[in-house]
Image: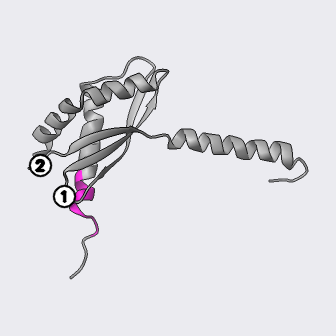
């Protein structure tokens, strides 16, 4: 028996990602100067629990994340209505810090090159 290229959980995760992005744009629009994007959604095999990773560009990241978490009911309601899922997963939101971590690593590498290897053409 051949394996399908994408499991159902992967397809549902992508649908949930798109729906959460739509809700963030339409029903919970960000404040001026604030940008929230959905980086990744991972969902377990039985589709009962989803982890949503958000990238938030704002002076008040924590407040923006708290606002999203406070509205988890809205997200579940809209997902259930618009995606027609039999089971609407529980949703947990997390701050994705991969960009900030990447910037830190880049800066460390830059510092090493400038301070430790001045004669090298890296």
Task: Give the residue displayed 19% in from the left and 30% down from the top.
Answer: 74
Main SS class of the magenta portion in the image: helix
Q: Is residue 118 located in the magenta-colored stretch of the structure? A: no
| In the depicted structure, whether residue 62 falls above or below residue 19 | above
Can you give x and y, in whole percent of width and height, for residue 111 in the image?
Answer: 77, 41
Q: Which residue is mark 2?
A: 87
Quadrant of the frame with the N terminus: bottom left
Q: How many marks?
A: 2
Can you give x and y, in whole percent of width and height, for residue 103 in the image?
Answer: 61, 40
Residue 114, which numbered label?
none
Secondary structure at numbered mark 2: loop
For this orientation, the residue located farthest to the bottom is 1
Q: Which residue is mark 1?
A: 46
For this orientation, the residue located farthest to the right is 119
- Residue 110, located in which quarter of the rendered image? top right
| In the depicted structure, whether residue 31 falls above or below residue 43 | above
Query: Closest to the observer: 62 or 1?
Result: 62
Task: Give the residue displayed 31% in from the left and 46% down from the top.
Answer: 51
- Separation of disc 1 and disc 2 at Cα? 9 Å
Mark 1 and mark 2 in contact? Answer it, CB < 8 Å.
yes
Disc 2 crowd rating (10 Å Cα; few below 14, some 14-19, many 20+) is few
Residue bounds of the magenta highlight: 5-12
Secondary structure at numbered mark 1: loop
Q: Is residue 11 located in the magenta-colored stretch of the structure? A: yes
Give whichever of discs 1 and 2 has the lower sequence position: 1
């Amino acid at each position: 028996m051949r394996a399908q290229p994408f499991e159902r959980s992967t397809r549902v995760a992508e649908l949930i990602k798109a729906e959460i992005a739509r809700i963030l744009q339409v029903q919970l629009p960000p404040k001026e100067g604030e940008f929230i994007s959905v980086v990744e959604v991972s969902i377990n095999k039985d589709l009962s629990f989803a982890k949503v990773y958000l990238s938030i560009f704002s002076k008040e990241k924590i407040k923006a994340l708290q606002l999203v978490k406070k509205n988890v009911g809205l997200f579940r309601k809209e997902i259930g209505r618009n995606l027609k899922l039999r089971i609407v997963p529980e949703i947990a939101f997390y701050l994705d810090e991969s960009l900030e971590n990447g910037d830190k690593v880049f800066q460390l590498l830059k510092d090493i090159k400038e301070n430790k290897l001045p004669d090298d053409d890296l």
